Amino acid sequence: MPLLVAGSVALDTIETPHDTRENVLGGSAVYFAYAASYFTPVRLVGVVGEDWPAEHTALLQSRNIDTAGLEVLAGTKTFRWRGRYLDNMNDRETIDVQLNAMGQFNPVLPDAFKRCRFLFLANGSTKLQLKVLDQCPGATLAVADTMDLWIRTERDELSALLQRIDGLVLNDSEAKMLTGENNLVRAGNRVREMGPKFVVIKKGEHGAMFFSRHETYVLPAYPTAEVIDPTGAGDSFAGGMMGYLAERGDFEPKTLKEAMAYGILVASFTVEDFSLERLKKIRREDLSVRMEEYRKMLTF
């Protein structure tokens, strides 16, 4: 069934020890939507400026991603991010951020989008996430992502959001910041006590942790020999996870575990090239092959 995502749509400049790419397609909603499109139709909500290349919209549409919610804001430029990865490819520094159209975005969802049962609020201002959530009262599964910036600057709004969503996705350092806990198990459970039914903590090259009232578990990352560009890996993880849940139409414990595994596998492809270049070259069958390898890896 259709999956709705709202978040950033961007043009990125990425520097890594391997190479540099200028003005490539990026943004949390873009990575999420492309990853989810392997499993289910996606409806995307975001904003761009007049400099947005039309071929990027065509690429998204070719993946059964409905872009009726992608607003082109007159007189503005598209959100831009420039970052540099250090030699270990785990640490990065932000060199420049230009909010541009994102700084003026007031999301208004098309009527068909408001009826989506599965909703993901990709990384972005918590205030914008709440505006989208307000327009989707019928969502049966609402999950959000967040980051350190919003934990610091929009803490009250984030607390309100956590009371209204079913799941939260964040990385390990953000879980510690949000809770003040240094132990990830305690941090995950503390976040869950703030409202969501389940919490997923992303741990980069170490996989992901899942927390609900009934179970806690860890899934390792898929062993990737060469990491070219980690940008968007976390968003791709969330897209794979939510895409599989929407395809299955439920979020029972077994389905959630399978969904997390698919999220890890999509992310393992994402990091193998810049932007969406690697994802453009694979099909659902490639994910199935890697899933069989992953299952064997976890069997002992």
Image (cartoon, rainbow, N blue to C red):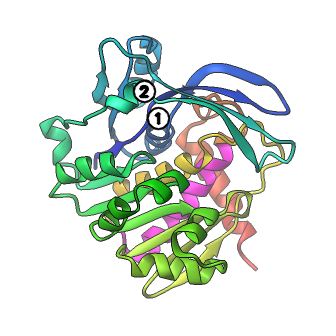
Q: Earlier in the sequence, mark 1 or mark 2?
A: 1
Residue 60, numbered label: 2
- Visible in this render: residue 244? no
Q: Return the residue at label 1.
A: 30
Where does the image place residue 83, in percent across and percent down from the top left?
68, 34
Mark 1 vs 2: CB contact within 8 A = yes
- Amino acid type at mark 2: Leu
Q: Quadrant of the C terminus?
A: bottom right
Asked if the magenta segment contains residue 253, the reply would be yes
Where does the image place residue 118, in percent across and percent down from the top left?
29, 55
Determine crowd level at label 1: few under 14, some 14-19, many 20+ residues with C-alpha closer than 10 A.
many
| Residue drawn at the location 43% of the way across and 17% of the way down | 77
Q: Is residue 275 left or right of residue 137?
A: right
Residue that protrudes farthest toward the bottom in the picture: 214
Report which quarter residue 255 is drawn in: bottom left
Q: Which residues are magenta?
A: 251-269
Would you place residue 72 above or below residue 225 in this image? above
| Residue drawn at the location 69% of the way across and 29% of the way down | 14
Would you place residue 290 above or below residue 106 in this image? below
Would you place residue 256 above or below residue 34 in this image? below
- Amino acid type at mark 1: Val
